Amino acid sequence: MNYETMYYNMLQRPRRNRKSEVIRQMVQETHISAANLIFPLFIVDGNNQKTEIASMPGIYRYSIDNLLREVESCLKLGLKSFDLFPNIEEALKDKYATESHREESLYLRAIRDVKNNFPEACVITDVAMDPYSSDGHDGIVENGEILNDETLEVLGKMALAHAQSGADIIAPSDMMDGRVGYIREVLDNNGYTHVSIMSYSAKYASAFYGPFRDALNSAPKFGDKKTYQMNPANQREALIEAGLDEMEGADFLMVKPALPYLDVIKLIKDNTELPVAAYNVSGEYAMVKAAIQKGWLNDQRAITEILMSIRRAGASAILTYHAKEVLENKWL
Ligand code: PBG
């Protein structure tokens, strides 16, 4: 081949736009900042508790006093959105998750305390029965079946209790049919029209929730979650879920997990005008941390590349356990 003539008329040389840092930044297509990040936080009963979760290095369960300190230190870094999850004692769990809407429960106290101390913080609350269910499922169990419509009633009570405690955004993570519309109606009928819903629209039955279930001690006591969470093989089904949530009044549509489902984030983004959120889940965090601890990956480069990929796929908001470290280390 005659290379000299072949290259003579090469009008497009994409490398020209990569030749200096200034130009690389000028043409950068995707950006990420603290405003895009939501930090999940685990809460446990007691005082002065801060225990690390073995499979999630750097992530802790906090008692409410320490939770407030943690929120304060995040706010100072510009990290202002938090998604709270409770670790509930086994003795308080039951078939109907009644602890989830008891006025003085750990979770509702935590919401009130965070909002009273830091009104500027955006508090996102998780609506699902599993942390409070003696069956470890996201719905009421009857003869081994997860009941849909009966569960909606519990979810409605839980969402209302969160709104009454000061939640800014309610995030139903249970995957029961019709729950967004049901919760919207309960909130509206009680004067909480201003409280938002971030729906876990496409939540897959994933292996990557393992460390989270350790953190909350919330693994199912029997079976799996495949009759309500989605089959990892399906993409088009995510559009059905997203379309329903949009019609039912969701303000955000979430995809979960994030990295194994970047195609789903992109698909939903291309088919909605609503903002899309993605949950970079516990197992994704654990994998990266383990490789970093072994010295197999560079922390800054691996973590920022992962978060950028989720933004690039179309997520406006990213729920990630990396949120605080990327800001503390000034990696963004
Ligand atoms: C429960 C819930 C789960 C997560 C968030 N809410 C676990 C599950 O569905 O079993 C997982 C989050 C993570 O793994 O980081 N409704």
Image (spheres, grey):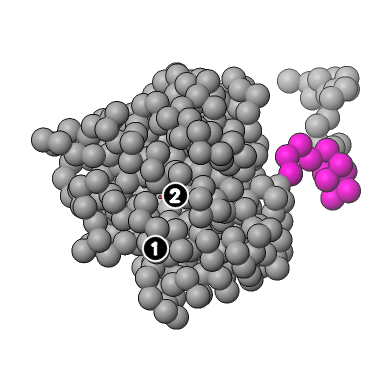
Picture quadrant where residue 246 is located: top right
Name above or below for residue 318 compared with residue 294: above
Q: Give the residue at x 44% y 72%.
A: 63
> CB under 8 Å between callouts 2 and 1?
no
Q: Position of residue 152 (x, y in %)?
A: 34, 34
Q: Which mark is residue 104?
A: 1
Name above or below for residue 92 compared with residue 203: below
- Which circle's residue, 2 or 1, is located before the other in the chain? 1
Q: Position of residue 17 (x, y in %)?
A: 84, 37
Q: Which mark is residue 186?
A: none
Is 291 or 214 nearer to us in this picture? Answer: 214
| Mark 2 nearby-residue class (10 Å; few <14, some 14–19, many ≥20) | some
Q: Magenta residues?
A: 21-31
Residue lying furthest bottom: 48
Amino acid at the residue labelled 2: Ala
Q: In the image, is 4 to the left or to the right of 57?
A: right
Q: CA distance from mark 2 to mark 1?
A: 11 Å
The reply to whether the residue tagged 2 has its Cβ within 8 angstroms of ligand 1 is no
Q: Which residue is mark 2?
A: 161
Picture quadrant where residue 315 is located: top right
Q: Position of residue 289 (x, y in %)?
A: 47, 61
Q: SS for tag 2?
A: helix
- Whether 145 is among the magenta residues is no
Residue 107 visible to an observer of this rendering: yes
Is 210 or 175 nearer to us in this picture? Answer: 175
